[in-house]
Amino acid sequence: MALVKSREGEGFEQLLKRFKKQCEKSGVLSEIKKREHYEKPSVRLKKKSIAARKRLLKKTRRGSWE
């Protein structure tokens, strides 16, 4: 859990902005979204494989232009 202490003369909006930034940086939001619904191991593996294939395709496409 991210803990943000308010600074002297800091407004609520700035404090909230720092809190959100810290949560995003630590990966809390992505972890919540990932755990929102149960995903079978086979589906997780398939998604991981598809993501790897996309990364490889993007890498080879980018490399051919240079």
Image: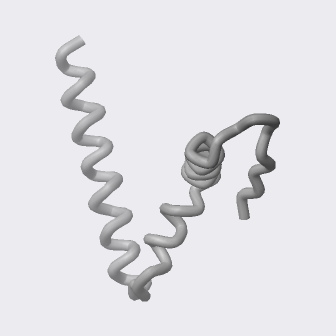
Which residue is at 80% across, 49% downward?
A: 5
Q: Please state which of residues 7 and 44 is positioned toward the viewer in this rendering.
A: 7
Q: Work out which quarter of the rendered image holds the C terminus and state it.
A: top left
Q: Is residue 40 left or right of residue 7?
A: left
Q: Is residue 44 visible?
A: yes
Tell me residue 46's x, y (percent). Answer: 31, 72
- Counting every numbered tag in the picture gives 0
Q: Is 40 situated above or below 19?
A: below
Q: Position of residue 52 (x, y in %)?
A: 34, 53
Residue 2 vs residue 45: left or right?
A: right
Image location of residue 43, percent across then percent down: 33, 80
**Taking 11 as reference, is 36 left or right?**
left
**Residue situated furthest top in the rendering:** 66
Q: Residue at x 19, y 29 (%)?
A: 61
Task: Give above or below for 45 relative to 37.
Answer: above
54 to the left or right of 9: left
- Front residue (pair 30, 38): 30
Give 55 or 15, whichever is nearer the viewer.
Answer: 15
Q: Quadrant of the N terminus?
A: bottom right
Q: Position of residue 58 (x, y in %)?
A: 24, 37
**Taking the image as drawn, is residue 25 in sight?**
no
Q: How is the image coloured?
A: one colour
Residue at horizontal 56%, vertical 45%?
13
